[in-house]
């Protein structure tokens, strides 16, 4: 059985794999995402390129390990009215991000890159989910921010936690909102790498 390596430090992505009882290991790549943000203004191209860079960095870090491994990397952003929204750096920024998204719909876009440790092939794809927030008050936004769920998350919220209280509608993959479009990953692994997640 090929070992799955998740190239991510995201708690939510790890929880997704754990919840599905998929055996995996993690590796942290720490690439310079700012470099890619300076080159790619198209949100889809940006997340695909960052995911690919993470996968290739992980492959380089693991090159001396003689194991059959499949590396999965991902990157998620929020796109709203043509503007790319990443992770908030502080509470004030988290408030501004959430305030701009309240009572509106935004696109949550995740790029996915999958490669095998001993194979040059890299399959890159993306998924987009439309998320609509309820109209909540400034005080409710501040109360949410005080939970600190916004930290390290695109759009400054986590659908699996208290943000579920103000998410009105989701159109598309629910797991994509957590940062891993599992149906897309399932299809790529099965079609391009001969790995069926039902067999893990």
Image (spheres, helix red, strand yellow):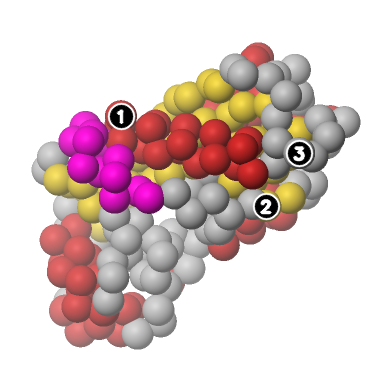
- Left or right: residue 183 versus residue 90 is right
> In percent of the image, x 23 and y 52: which residue is there?
85
Q: Position of residue 133 (x, y in %)?
A: 26, 57
Describe the element under mark 1 as helix, strand or loop. helix
Q: What is the spatial separation of the Cα atoms under label 2 and label 1, in whole angstroms?
A: 25 Å
Q: Nearer the viewer, residue 34 or 71?
A: 34
Q: Position of residue 29 (x, y in %)?
A: 54, 50
> In percent of the image, x 20 and y 84: which residue is there?
139
Residue identified by numbered label 3: 64
Q: Are marks 2 and 3 in contact (CB under 8 Å)?
A: no
Q: Earlier in the sequence, mark 3 or mark 1?
A: 1
Q: Are marks 2 and 1 in contact (CB under 8 Å)?
A: no
Q: Earlier in the sequence, mark 2 or mark 1?
A: 2
Q: Position of residue 84 (x, y in %)?
A: 21, 46
Quick one: label 2, few (<14), some, or many (20+) residues within 10 Å? some
Quick one: label 1, few (<14), some, or many (20+) residues within 10 Å? some
Residue 173 visible within the image: no
Q: What is the spatial separation of the Cα atoms under label 3 and label 1, in whole angstroms?
A: 30 Å
**The quadrant where residue 116 appears:** top right
Q: What is the spatial separation of the Cα atoms under label 2 and label 3, in whole angstroms?
A: 16 Å
Residue 97 visible within the image: yes
Q: Which residue lies most toward the top here? A: 191
Q: Is residue 100 above or below residue 116?
A: below
Q: Position of residue 164 (x, y in %)?
A: 41, 63
> In percent of the image, x 83 and y 35: which residue is there?
67
Residue identified by numbered label 2: 26
Describe the element under mark 2 as helix, strand or loop. strand
Residue identified by numbered label 1: 45
Q: Nearer the viewer, residue 128 or 65?
A: 65
């Amino acid at each position: 059985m090929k070992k799955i390596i998740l190239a991510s430090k995201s708690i939510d992505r790890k929880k997704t794999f754990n919840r599905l009882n998929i055996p995996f290991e993690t590796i942290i790549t720490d690439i310079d995402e700012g470099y890619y943000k300076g080159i790619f203004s198209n949100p889809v191209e940006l997340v695909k390129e960052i995911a690919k860079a993470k996968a290739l960095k992980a492959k380089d870090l693991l090159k001396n390990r003689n194991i059959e491994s499949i590396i999965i990397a991902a990157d998620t952003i929020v796109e709203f009215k043509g503007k790319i929204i990443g992770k908030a750096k502080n509470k004030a920024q988290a408030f501004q991000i959430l305030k701009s998204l309240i009572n509106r719909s935004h696109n949550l876009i995740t790029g996915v890159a999958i490669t095998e440790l001993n194979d040059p092939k890299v399959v890159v794809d993306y998924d987009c989910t439309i998320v609509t927030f309820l109209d909540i008050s400034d005080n409710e936004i501040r109360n949410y921010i005080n939970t600190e769920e916004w930290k390290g998350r695109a759009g400054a919220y986590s659908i699996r936690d208290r943000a579920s209280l103000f998410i009105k509608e989701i159109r598309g993959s629910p797991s994509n909102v957590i940062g891993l479009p599992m149906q897309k990953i399932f299809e790529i692994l099965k079609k391009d790498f001969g790995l069926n997640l039902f067999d893990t």
